[in-house]
Amino acid sequence: MQKQKRILKKLYDVKPVKTDGSLDMEKIGGFDRIVRVEKKYLPKKNVSFQKMGDIRKPASPWHAVRPSSKIGPDKKRPLEKPETRRANIIHLGKRVPNEILSVSKIYTATVLFDKKAERREISDECVERDPGGFFENEIQEKKAEFEKCVIFSDSDISKSTEKILVSLESGQNKKKKKRRNRNSKSRLADFFPKYDSLQIRFSSSFSFIAAIFLFSLILPAFAFIQRGIEVKKLLSGSGDNVMGVIAEAQSNLSSGQFEKASSNFEQSYEILKSANDEVSKIGGDFSEILRFIPGVSKIATANYLLSAGENISLAGKIMVNSMKPLAKIENPLEAEMNFSLAELFLNLREGVRDTAEKLKAANEDIQKTNFEDLPPEIQPQFSSLKKKLPLVVSSLDSFSDNSNIILDVLGYNGPRKFLFLFQNNQEMRATGGFIGSYGILDMSDGRIKKLFVDDIYNPDGQLTAKIIPPEPIQKMSAVWTMHDANWFPNFPTSAEKVAWFYEKTGGPTVDGVIAMSPNVIEKMLSITGPIDMPEYGATVDKDNFREIAQYEVEVDYDKEQNQPKKFIADLTPKILNELLSTKNPKMMLMALDIVGSALKEKHILVYSKNYNIQKMISGQGWSGEMLSASKDYLSVINSNINGYKTDGVIDETIEHNAQIGADGNIVDEVTVTRKHNGGNEKYDWWNRVNGNYVRVYVPKGSKLLEASGQTREFVSPPLDYQSLQFKKDPQVSQIEEATTIDEASGTRIYTEDGKTVFANWVYVSPGETVTLKYKYQLPFKLFFDDLHHPAESFSILYQKQSGSVGSSLFSSVRFPSSYKVIWKYPDLSEVGGNEVTLKTKLETDKFIGFAAEKGQ
């Protein structure tokens, strides 16, 4: 092998220091560059290409990647983007590849080009990137994104580079073997259900600001860098300055002064960039190496933190600039719209995407910092930033990925007509409450063309179709109409049914249905403050909204014309005006956060007839669907039938106990306790008997063993439907014709949405408490096999009823003493003896699970 002439035979793994311990910059500056390239331009060589359709971006960190043992003519490697710092020997960035750093032995290597050298002309050959999440899916050519790449022939890579690869491969084989041994102990398949509604979500806007603030707290501590660093004062001063500038940016952002906030972020960027340039003169291109060297890793930590600060500042500026058009928004219900909500949203989406890219770069630097290099007093703040920043990035990515839902609602893809349902959860129904009012929203190109709100009984009076209602509805209504059509707990089913009835009243065909409970308006009033309603002689706030709204609808209306006042229709534009007239971004973000929480807690449900859009809605957990579960499942659905508004004073507790037997069979017991707190209330609608048709949804095939606490009752048809030529609804008929009656308890048993349903009447009077119990055997059992199946898992999905304010939930799973729990979820669940328990409030869908081994 020909001797490398351009390799200096002097190598320092630690830079020289003076007697006082500071870096000897004069001595360091006296040496020439360790690696030099004679030409500033890359040599002209033959370039070979390879189709990259089967290449995946690694889902695991670099140290878990198994590189090839040799790069030959049949294995050409493309160059990744420099900022990704991928595990690739051919690297355009200024930092040394991670793989080289993991090799304990020092090798010589030919540097392919100098950082000042111009890049060779980029070829047209492209790398197909993974379009799916986490790089586990097959490449989909239609959805793939492409980036240009540079391919080198094997002659571009030195033999010493091959040595490094061989050494790496040997090390990684050992790591893989250890991982295989660790993972072979047990295999838990299909443990987690794939619902986004169970994922952790939070406000990306507030988390982003929090991440910026946390970073600003870390900067003053940069004085801990070794005493000899000449930029010590600059770093300490930078931290103090940035804290002040970021605080000012937050203040300006909250008051709607976008220009000033943008200037603040620009200023913080310049401060941090200046500091980073100084540190780079010391650590610079060697940060990747220095972070592994004891004593000087603090230089690399400073470099990474300052680099992260630059990107966070740029992210803040981008986000602020994208929010500037929000100041132009006026109340679309009270003014002629001279702007497009779709255009504003598109601008915001672009800003979110660019912000996410900067935060991703910042996150890469943050994750590389050495926690031990930080002073103890700031480690908690840094730890919080390190945990939150990836979640902020994920939240922003999710916003971008699902922005098509909002754009479709805004009419960006063409004119859209949506049916709004205002469901009163003080009179519970399957999807959230009795439909007292409805609205029609016409959108086109981001502009509201029409918003009409009306009492539900007006279109019901125009209904010409004669449909037999579900049997429980017949107790109070002989005809099935629009206001009772939300009978099915699966919201897409009920939404289709309500839209169908609306068409039969003479209404237009709609593109989708959106349902909302009063909780949303209450929370909006909590941020707008009291709103004057002089036409009603009242001032409405979050505390009296329900009382006033109920009074205006039930009591204080024109009885001669039998026309209830359109209280919701009159209040809605005033709330919007309060939110938009202040031009306060903080208030807007709080309103968006309320909407986000309402979607997660099923106080807002969305359905679209567009299949692709509905699939995205479902993926976000906004559709109010009955979900499938691999193991146990429970959902308790209440339907108030002639029970007035008494659900507003009912407290409900759900206890669920699963007993796993020694033979693997599982018996569940569900107890539903309902306490009526009415009787002495101001208005009579809270002092009546609560009549409730309760449906309990459990795994399909479950066998009822016992039932108690119910009222045995059967409803006789109020009309001769056959002679009056009423038609049967196909979905209702399918359920009722397949229903069986348990002789011992009178419980109705049938199958719906892939679940077995136990249905009964339950009544509770004011001041009293009633308890409904079911005991049943699950259709599956746990199975252990010492050789092939040494561990087993058990899980339960609890789905809350849409619109419910949240029942108290007590979950318990008991198992034989021979079981040993090796894993559980969530962390809040407790393991004691031979039992796993969870106590929570069912404000959202909940999931509990554990994995166990069976001892001898």
Image: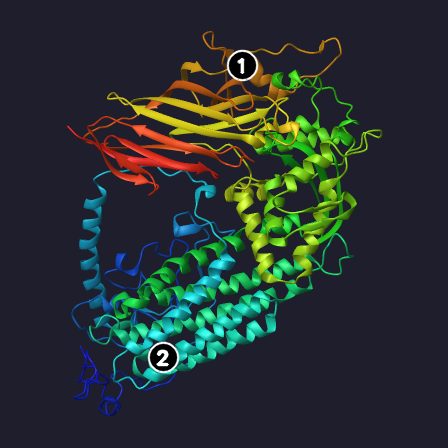
Tag 1, which secondary structure? loop
Mark 1 = which residue? 738
Relative to residue 562, is residue 370 depicted above or below?
below
Quarter of the figure with residue 774: top left
Instruction: Give the percent coordinates (x, y) of residue 248.
Output: 52, 73
- Marks 2,1: beta carbons within 8 A: no
- First in sequence, mark 2 or 1: give its number: 2
Q: Nearer the viewer, residue 379 or 703?
A: 379
Question: What colour scheme governs how the chains and residues are painted in the rendered image of this protein?
Answer: rainbow
At 49% across and 27% down in the image, what residue appears?
A: 636
Q: Looking at numbered disc 2 in the image, what kind of residue is underneath it?
A: Ser
Question: Does the rendering let one see residue 197?
Answer: yes
**Which SS class for mark 2?**
helix
Q: In which quarter of the image is the C terminus?
A: top left
Considering the image in quadrants, where does the N terminus appear?
bottom left
Coordinates of residue 429 in the picture (x, y in percent): 59, 28
Which residue is farthest right? 560
Q: In this view, does 424 lie above or below 226?
A: above
Q: Is residue 129 visible?
A: no
The nearer-to-camera label among 2 and 1 is 2
Q: Which mark is residue 305?
A: none
In the picture provided, is 486 more to the left or to the right than 102?
right
Q: Quadrant of residue 166?
A: bottom left
**Left or right of 439, for residue 613:** left
Q: Which of 309 and 107 is in front in this view?
A: 309
Q: Where is residue 322 in the image (x, y as percent from the top left)?
A: 59, 65
Is 522 or 391 nearer to us in this picture? 522
Q: Can you tell which mark lies on residue 236?
A: 2
| Residue count near mark 1 (Cα–Cα under 10 Å), binned few <14, some 14–19, many ≥20 | few
Q: Distance between the residues labelled 2 and 1?
A: 75 Å
Which residue is depicted at the point 44% across and 78% down? 241
